[in-house]
């Protein structure tokens, strides 16, 4: 299981755009959206890819909605 310290450390290393999305998951309005989506078996996804050298998270280019891998 990931500890809170590990999570905080990994969240701090995210690029700004991904850090914003990660922080938003705790907002009451996002939590309400998540509960509503869950009634339809849907969820929230933060589009990203991994740097090939470091494995770090990076945002996708604006013209992509998924990484083809």
Image: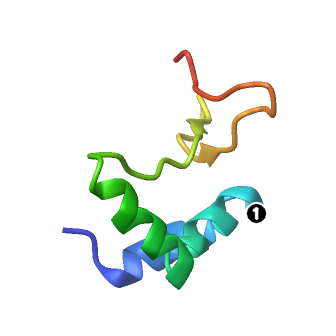
Residue 28 or residue 68, whichever sits in front:
28
- Identify which residue is drawn at 55% across, 77% down: 29
x, y percent for residue 44: 46, 52
- Identify which residue is drawn at 35% across, 67% down: 35
x, y percent for residue 4: 35, 82
Residue found at the far right of this picture: 62
Which color mode does the image show? rainbow
Residue 67 or residue 39, whichever sits in front:
39
Secondary-structure class at tag 1: helix
Q: In the shown orientation, is residue 32 left or right of residue 24?
A: left
Q: In the shown orientation, is residue 51 left or right of residue 55?
A: right
Q: Is residue 5 above or below residue 53?
A: below
Q: In the figure, residue 68 lies in which quadrant?
A: top right
Q: Which residue is mark 1?
A: 16
Q: Is residue 10 above or below residue 44?
A: below
Residue 24 or residue 10, whichever sits in front:
24
What quarter of the picture does the N terminus occupy? bottom left
Numbered label tally: 1
* Mark 1 crowd level (few <14, some 14–19, many ≥20, 10 Å Cα): few
Q: Is residue 51 above or below residue 34?
A: above
- Identify which residue is drawn at 39% across, 83% down: 5
Residue found at the far left of this picture: 1
x, y percent for residue 11: 55, 69
- Identify which residue is drawn at 35% across, 46% down: 42
Q: In the shown orientation, is residue 19 left or right of residue 29?
A: right
């Amino acid at each position: 299981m990931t500890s809170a310290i590990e999570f905080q450390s990994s969240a701090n290393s995210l690029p700004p755009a991904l850090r914003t999305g990660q922080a938003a998951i705790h907002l009451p309005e996002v939590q309400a959206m998540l509960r509503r989506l869950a009634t339809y078996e849907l969820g929230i996804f933060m589009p990203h890819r991994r740097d090939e050298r470091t494995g770090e998270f990076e945002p996708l280019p604006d013209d992509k909605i998924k990484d083809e891998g």
